[in-house]
Amino acid sequence: MRRSNAFTLIELLVVIAIIAILAAILFPVFAQAREAARKATCQSNLNQAMKGIMMYVQDYDERWMHYDVQWDCGLGKPENSISVHPGTNGIGTNPNVRHGESWHSGWAAGVQPYIKSGAALRDPNLSKWDPHSWGDHNWCLTTYNMSPQLLHGASRNGTALAAIDFPASKAAIWPYPNYHGGPIVDFNNPTWAENVAFADGHIKFMRRSNSLCINDPDPNLRNLHWYSKVDGIAACQWTPGGRDW
């Protein structure tokens, strides 16, 4: 009697079951590895951006970028008018594309000549995010947000380096929205967790839930965008001299 060389149904089912088990084990590992790679890319981006910022600061009397740098995403060039909220040249779903304060995109225009890389100013987790869909904010040059406290200074002309009392605790730039395969949340959401570049240049993965102003009794002062903790003062303050973490 001749023996058949074909697999039996039971053998095929066993092989399929083993493959399914291995896939169930490995797919989460692959997802974690991909997320780790994206975090590393984000850290590299922030590192490049901070080096560009520091070169800019040294070239401009040790001051951070000017607060009122508008960037017209529709025209692809700066606007010369003073910062205004209502836009007049909307594109896509964003009616306020010329939303002017420089923490949204204008600061990136100042850094670009130093780093010469548009990709370095975009968070890898947001590759499929439509920047024009995020409210009235202007993100066509970068998805990294810069602290408006550092940009504003005493007279909207940028904070002097000497006015930053705790550069190792003062957040400088970070991804404005947070996306890791789930819903996009902004940085004032307690679940937000991202790489943050601090004013002294170091990069660290931070959680919004650990920031110093998150539990301020006044909910209006919990906004990382605007307020920081000052030693000896209970309420969080608008100042580039405070601490964020």
Image (tube, rainbow, N blue to C red):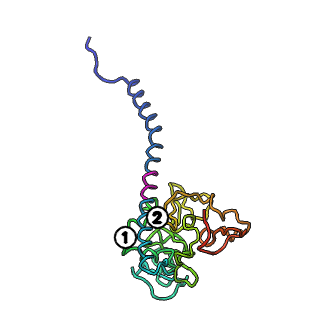
Tag 2 secondary structure? loop
- Classify mark 1: residues with Cα within 10 Å, few (<14), some (14-19) or many (20+): some
169 falls in the magenta region: no
> Is 52 or 67 nearer to us in this picture?
52
Q: Which of the two marks, 2 or 1, is nearer to us in this view?
A: 1
Mark 1 or mark 2, which is nearer the start of the sequence? 1
> Is 17 or 144 nearer to us in this picture?
144
| Boundaries of the magenta span | 35-41
Tag 1 secondary structure? helix
Q: Where is residue 27 in the image (x, y as percent from the top left)?
A: 45, 42
- Classify mark 2: residues with Cα within 10 Å, few (<14), some (14-19) or many (20+): some
**Location of residue 50 with respect to 206 vertically, above or below:** below
> Is 144 or 31 nearer to us in this picture?
144
Q: Picture quarter containing residue 13?
A: top left
Residue at 28 percent across and 21 percent down: it is 5
Q: Position of residue 147 (x, y in %)?
A: 54, 72
Q: Position of residue 211 (x, y in %)?
A: 62, 61
> Is 90 or 119 nearer to us in this picture?
119
Residue at 42 percent across and 83 percent down: it is 78
List the residue tagged with mark 2. 129
37 falls in the magenta region: yes
Q: Which quadrant of the rendered structure holds the N terminus?
A: top left
Q: At label 2, which amino acid type do we have?
A: Trp
Q: Which mark is residue 43?
A: none
Q: How far apart are marks 2 and 1 (CA)?
A: 23 Å
List the residue tagged with mark 1. 115
